Amino acid sequence: MEWLRTMWLPVSQGSDFAKEIDGLFMDIFWLSMFFFVGIVAAMIYFAWRYRFKPGRVTPHQTHNTTLEVVWTVIPTLIILVLFFVGVISYMKFAVAPGEAMEIQITGKQWLWTFEYPDGTRSVNEMHVPVNKNVRLVMTSEDVLHDFYVPDMRIKRDLIPGRYTQIWFRSNNSAIGEHVATCAEYCGKGHSDMHAKLLVDSQADFDKWMATGGTEWEDYKGHMWDWGKIQWDRKGCSTCHTLDGTSSKGPTWKGIWGTMVTLSDGKTVLVDEAYVRESMMLPQAKIVKGFDPVMPTFQGLLRENEIQGLVALIKSLQ
Ligand code: CUA
């Protein structure tokens, strides 16, 4: 019945929970099917059996104690069983085991930041080691968001001013890339608010933690390409276009070396200092006609990534 399960549940069962949750879902599905078919069949039979015939009179009905006790007690027992199975699963799902690795997740309009125990931070890209318990401690900087990874069957709200948590353990079938997305409408960029979850082997995970990646070295000499990758990965692309069209933020095309007008009427030259300041202190100078919605990237961009972004903007003259 795998085809039936995959009709409404994700094909990948990347975490230990997935099989349990899917199993419970399918059990409830079959139970519902059993009663649906039984009730509809009885309904059709009775409609036919007691259809109108001239001269047929309905006899006087009193109650039937046995029947009433049976149809009360059996459904009550079924519901109690479902309740306890559900509660037991929920308890496992809600409370992380003590030895879990902790990742702090912050949601903000409209990106995800991940912070690891050693201080490593990443944007819109989360790495976890396979077969390890991972506890996610989450909060929001602005409005309600909801961290949802369908392949792991985990989903929980991020609430401003409060910490929520959830945990999972990926299994060997999960090595590779998965989608994490926001599942709570949080404004105009909601549908762009997704991240990559990468389940790595322990060796790959350790390497990623140690270096933050050495990928950028491949782009020495054409740093604008590295910048373009960051534009996409770090979420810049959510608000800044490269082709001149206006989005939630100013386009990057053709701005380098020009004077732009700010919301307070002053003008500023788009140079390295201004671009850098706009990444770290985005509220300092707001371009006229745009809302002050950009989050700070302080601590989220490595030096080579900033250089890449600057090179990209420069290349779009
Ligand atoms: Cu964040 Cu929707």
Image (cartoon, rainbow, N blue to C red):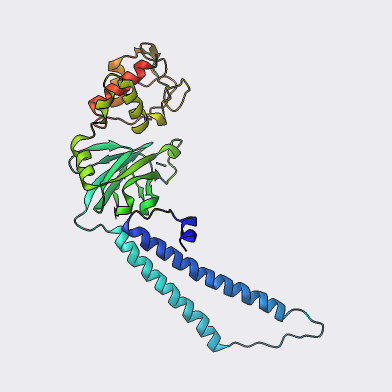
Pick whichever, 138 or 310, lies toward us: 310
How many marks are shown on the rendered structure? 0
Residue 164 higher or lower than 27, as above or below: above
Residue 134 higher or lower than 190, as above or below: below
Query: Which residue is at a point 33% across and 67% down the rendered structure image?
Result: 88
Residue 214 higher or lower than 45, as above or below: above
Q: What is the x, y in percent for residue 126?
A: 30, 42
Instruction: Note whether residue 281 is visible.
Output: no
Q: What is the x, y in percent for residue 28?
A: 46, 67
Quarter for ligand 1?
top left
Quadrant hosting residue 241: top left
Q: What is the x, y in percent for residue 7?
A: 50, 56
Residue 30 higher or lower than 58, as above or below: above
Instruction: Note whether residue 180 is visible.
Output: yes
Quadrant hosting residue 317: top left
Q: What is the x, y in percent for residue 50?
A: 72, 81
* Name of the residue lying farthest toward the right: 54
Give the side of residue 70 with respect to residue 311, left or right: right
Pick whichever, 77 or 149, lies toward us: 149
Query: Which residue is at a point 33% across and 53% down the rendered structure image?
Result: 173
Quadrant hosting residue 57: bottom right
Query: Which residue is at a point 40% across and 64% down the rendered structure image?
Result: 23
